[in-house]
Amino acid sequence: MSQILVRKQPWWQLLSIQAGGTICLPVIMIGQLVCQKFGWLAALLSVGLGNLFLLAIGYLLASLSTYRPQSTVEHAASYFGERGKLLFASFMMFSMLGWFGIQLNVMSLSCEQLLNMFGIATTYHVRNVGIGIIISAVMCLGMKAMKGLSYFCAPLLGLTLLYATCFSEGSLPSVAPLTISWLGGLSLIIGANIAAVIDLPTYFRHAKSGKDAKICILMLYGIIVPFIEIVGIYLSAVTGGDSILDVLQKGHGALWMMWVSCFVLLSGWATNNANLYSSVTSSYSLPGRFSPIIRTLILGIIGTAIACFNPLGNIEHILDLLSVTIGGMGAVILANYLLERSNSKYRNLPWSTFASWLSGIIIGIFSFFFHGLTTGVPAFDAFVTSFLIQITFNLIYQRVRTYETIDD
């Protein structure tokens, strides 16, 4: 995707690129999942607060992107050193391949439904492996081989959602009483989007101005992403469907069911092309000289293997893991940027960046197991911890240096 952005982009072009990746089934699926687990009122609160948090991070990262136009991996190298670059690239690869596996599971469910209509029985692993091999093989031809697919998938998804929403049968159930458990929905919303937000500098380095980058963020996480997630919440609430297929198909005829199954395969293919492409791009920051075809095949096989372990069924734990690790690293990058801009005595301390990041991971994991002693939102706890500790380390170092200078 970064190769497409070769000119300075106004906000509407940046938004069109970001929205193309945002209007996809996983975003709707997160809204549906949060509603299913915590009720529609808790889901709406999660969407509102979660996207407000993401919006604040994205707004600051938009400023960073125009202050120093670099990719996120390059920012990680600036503050963490080359080891940080390797770590960040590895976690981004794992994140994209995790989403590859989740999307492959959704495609497998859709494929099973289609094959059952024709009386063809298949196993779970056969479908996942078969679809994964096909996607990886086609991607070996390059992103251009499937680029056209992504151009019309987003409009088709929009029309499909519009029809499903307008003609869905049922009504909103009564409001379930709010309990502290609704914070789990907040974790899902943040965890599903945090990697994309942290990677925004990769795209916004080509923004025409800081204002254009910030307008794009306001539109993206202030309107578009929340709206799509709310659609998933509404459809889940009124239909009571157990899966994304049930949510989109319930209450309609056989022809619509077939269309949705076909469309889920089509949309999932386009989304997984982007996931695999992003993973291949991140792999160039790691040691090893492999051709693009070999990289695509290796990463496609890894993503397919992940799908065989049913990441869709364990999506909460996966999102918590990704949000704690990648979110903590993004917090350190952001803290260093703010210190650099606000303090003329700022000095980058690679040892403190790793210490801050690891502290955030520890607190995030602690938050996962002991909800009552923290906010109960691992992604938020890890981000805030890494951010505050990084600032504290730097301020302490500056004060020590000041005293040493006075003593000399």
Image (spheres, grey):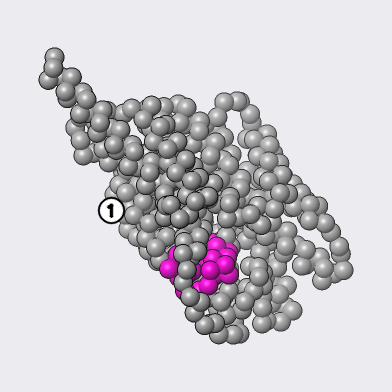
Residue 365 visible in the shown view: yes
In the rendered image of this protein, does residue 265 appear above or below residue 286? below
Name the quadrant of the C terminus.
top left
208 relative to 17 in the view: left or right: left
Please tell me whether residue 44 belongs to the stretch shown in magenta. Answer: yes
How many marks do you count on the picture? 1
155 relative to 297 in the view: left or right: left
332 or 204: nearer the viewer: 332
Q: Main secondary structure of the magenta part?
A: helix
Q: In percent of the image, x 39 and y 63: which residue is there?
A: 49
Q: In percent of the image, x 43 and y 41: which residue is there?
A: 360
Please tell me whether residue 33 belongs to the stretch shown in magenta. Answer: yes
Read off the residue under disc 1. Answer: 211
11 relative to 289 in the view: left or right: left
Q: In percent of the image, x 56 and y 77: which residue is there?
A: 237
Residue 167 quadrant: bottom right
Q: In percent of the image, x 66 and y 57: which residue is there?
A: 313
